[in-house]
Image (cartoon, rainbow, N blue to C red):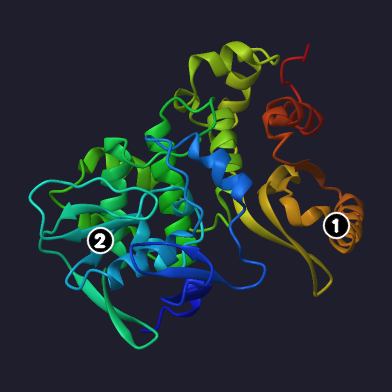
Amino acid sequence: MSIFHSVEGWINTQGLGELVSGKYWFLPNDGTERSAHLASLQAFHHPRRIQFNVIAAARAVAMALERPGYVIIGLSALMVFGLGFFGDACDTTLAGPVRLTKLGMARSPTVFRRYASETWTVFYDRRPVAISAPAVAVVDTLKHLRSGFHQWPTPAWFADAVLFRAISLIDATRRHLGIHPHDILDAARGKVDRKWLLKALRLSSELADSPKETEVRMLLKILLTEPRLASQEFWDSLAIPSKFWAAVRALKLQVSEQVPVFKGERLITVLDLALVELKIAIMYDGEHHLARKQRDRDARIYLELEAQGWIVLRLSANTLADLPEYLAVALRARVGGLPELP
């Protein structure tokens, strides 16, 4: 299996690009450069405030090439496999012949003691690289999340930041790497607390295209079915009274993901999330929706959805926190007998 394309650039010894390790530089493909401003912002959330200017996959491969016999593990392995989320702001993780964990920096890996596990051999520019099997890499990443070794921002309204990171990770690996929960459970036997892992798997989904969609789904789950996942501060801050949400939870509404909407036989769009029976759609608009062509396309889609009787709640990064208020209004419009809103 070649990993050349997942690296999105050229690892070289000619001094081209950014120095990534002791002997290797990395020259990214056009348009894939890591923003120095973003790297600086993300460093604030790193446990040791380390700034990573090179993408995770390139760092992992370069550092593994320098260290024959070492294995790319954990989140670094998932990034090499093409995950695309979380890892660019986190440590490079390898396993090797060490007795104690050796912490790394921006240009050196954190090295964990190697243990017996399933290992694959992949190739970068015809050179072999040892890497953990995908499910094993997920389990190692979950261990690193539980220990606090890996951290990234989580919404303040979710009570357990570690659990939220785990759900987000599992969502992404299920959706983008096709890793099955049963494989994660098998690989985690004796390594991760089973009760905790089963909870994370139960709350995960294979249909979330992005971490933001995971965030929207979890907020809906809190509002509609599982209020205890939220922090008390979240409930105290809501303008909508708790008796309203208690009445909503009594309805036992089901949220569906990736719901196709047709006009005749023509696909109009796929809704991120929806309360199908009530025809309430929830759509998260990422940055690409700011482009003029995409805005025009979105406008046509939303006109058609409204013509078909859908209430569409459009969210962005800055309006996601307003979902409870707008969802409450939509529910009042669709369901009789709910408590009045303030």
Judged from the image, the secondary structure of the residue bearing numbered disc 2 is: helix
Q: Is 109 displayed left or right of 332 in the figure?
A: left
Residue at the limit of the structure toward the left, as seen here: 99
Badge nearest the viewer, 1 or 2: 2
Q: Quadrant of the N terminus?
A: bottom left
Q: Which mark is residue 136?
A: 2
Question: Where in the figure is residue 244, as x and y percent of width and height?
Answer: 66, 17
Q: Which mark is residue 199?
A: none
Quick one: 338 or 95, which is closer to the camera?
Answer: 95
Q: Amino acid at mark 2?
A: Val
Name above or below for residue 130 compared with residue 106: below
Quick one: 252 or 238, which is closer to the camera?
Answer: 238
Quick one: 32 or 194, which is closer to the camera?
Answer: 32
Residue beneath the point at 77% across and 14% down: 340
Q: Is 266 displayed left or right of 81 in the figure?
A: right
Q: Is 249 displayed left or right of 68 in the figure?
A: right
Q: Which mark is residue 298?
A: 1
User: In the picture, residue 13 is in which quadrant?
Assistant: bottom left
Residue beneath the point at 32% across and 65% down: 63
Question: Where in the figure is residue 228, as x and y percent of width and height?
Answer: 45, 23
Name above or below for residue 217 compared with residue 28: above
